[in-house]
Amino acid sequence: MTPTTKKALALVVALGAVAAACGSDDDTSSEPAATDGGEPAATDGGEAVCPTNLVIQKDWWPETEHGGTYQLIGAGGESDPSLFTYSGPIDPAYAVGGIETVEIRSGGDAIEFQPVSAVMMTDRDITLGYVNTDDAIQSSPTVEVTGVATTLEINPQMIMWDPEQLDVDVDNPGTIGESGARVLHFSEATYIDWLISKGFMDEGQSDPNYGGAPDQWISDGGDFIQQGFATNEIFKYENLIDWKDGAPAPVDYAIIHELGWQPYPAAYSVLTERLDELSPCLELLVPKLQQAWVDYLNEPEPIGDVVIEVTEAYNNYWTLTPELNARAFELFDSEGYGGNGPDDTYGNFDPDRIQTLFDDFGVILENRGITLPDGFSAESVYTNEFIDESIGR
C-alpha cells in the first residue's frame, strides 16, 4: 500500500466515525437528493430527486473504455487541465431528475492514485464513482460501495511481455511464474493476489511500482511483464512507442478475464450508506446510463474524438489517437468487452459471476488476515434494482 493510499484510508475511517455520529438512514432515506448548492433539483414535472450537477469520479485518465460516460455530455463540454475535469450540459437525451450538467473527473495520477471509494467518502459532491467489483470487496472493511450498473461487460485488463525475451505461453498461465520475470503493476492490484494464489506466479515477482507511464518499459527494453489494457497499451507499444532498438515492436499478452479472474471493471458505484438517499435518482438515472453506453458503442467514433480532445487538453503522458481508438472499438465487439451480459441487457450484473469472485477473493483476503464487515456478502457488492432489462445492444 502506498503512503498516499494509507493516508486516504485513514481519513476515510475518521470521516466514517463522524458520519455515524452525525446522521442516520432515517435522516436521508425519504428526502430528495440536494443540488451542489444545497437546494433540491427541479425536475420535469416530477419530484426533485437528483443533483443539478452530476459528478462522476473515474478511476483513470480519459480513455476509449470510458466513452459511455462522456456520451452523457457529448461534444459540448469544456476541459479543465488544472482540475482534470470535463464538464458541460447533459445531453437532453439523458436528462432526468433535474440533472442539468455533468462533471467527469479523472482518476489515477489525477487523484494521486487514491482509491475511488476513499475519494467518494471524503467528497460528497460525487454521486457516482468508477469502482471495480473486486476493489469494492477489498475496500469494504473501511468503505462500502454498491455497484448500480456496469460500464463494460469484460475487463480489458491484461499483462504483456516481449515474446523474444520471455517464454510465456498465454494458454499456460504457469509459465508466468516459470519465466521468473518481475511483473510490474499498480499497487493493490487484486488480480496479482489471485495469480499468486493460483500458483501462476510467485510473490517475489510482484513489483507494485507501476505508475501508468511507459518509462520503465522503455528504459529496461521490455525485459519484464507489465500490466495494461488490451484496448490501449498493445496498440501503443506495437505502433507508437519506440522501446526496442529505437522503434515499436510486437508484444504478447494475456487477458486476466480469460485466465479466470472476472470482476466488472469501473462499475458505476455509490456509497452504500447513501444508497437509500440516492435511490429515487438512480431509478431514473441508471436506465439513462445504460442507454448512453449502448448509444456510444453503437456509434463510438464521435465520442472517441471527444476523448482524444480531452486528453490533448490535459497535455501529459497519457495520449490517444484515432487509430488507437479504432482498434479499441474493434475489440469492444470482437472480444465482447462492450457486449450484453449473459442475457439481452446491457449494464446489469451477473449474480453467479459476482458470487464466484466473492468466494475466490474471500479466501485471498482471509489469507491476508483481512476480515470483511459483518453481514457483507456477494449481494452487498451490487444491485440490479435500477436496471432496465429492456435496454441492450
Image (tube, rainbow, N blue to C red):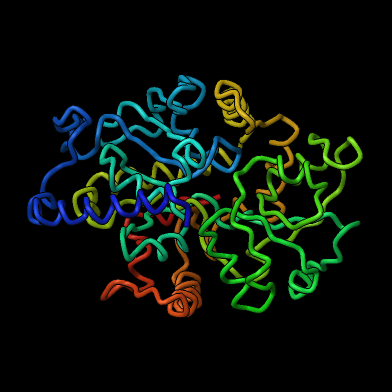
Residue 67 sits in quarter: top right
Left or right of 19 on screen, residue 387: right
Q: Position of residue 287 (x, y in %)?
A: 38, 46
Q: Can I make out residue 282 in this image?
A: yes
Q: Nearer the viewer, residue 73 or 299?
A: 73
Q: Position of residue 152 (x, y in %)?
A: 54, 51
Q: Nearer the viewer, residue 88 or 4?
A: 4
Residue 123 sits in quarter: top left
Left or right of 54 on screen, residue 267: right
Residue 197 sits in quarter: bottom right
> Which residue is at a point 48% across and 51% down the rendered structure image?
266
Is residue 143 shown above or below 81? below
> Which residue is at a point 45% across and 22% down the rendered structure image?
82
Tell how many labels.
Answer: 0
Q: Position of residue 179 (x, y in %)?
A: 80, 69
Is residue 99 shown above or below 21? above
Q: Position of residue 12 (x, y in %)?
A: 28, 52
Q: Can I make out residue 336 in this image?
A: no
Q: Nearer the viewer, residue 134 or 9?
A: 9
> Which residue is at a point 42% across and 57% down the rendered structure image?
389
Q: Nearer the viewer, residue 204 or 253?
A: 204
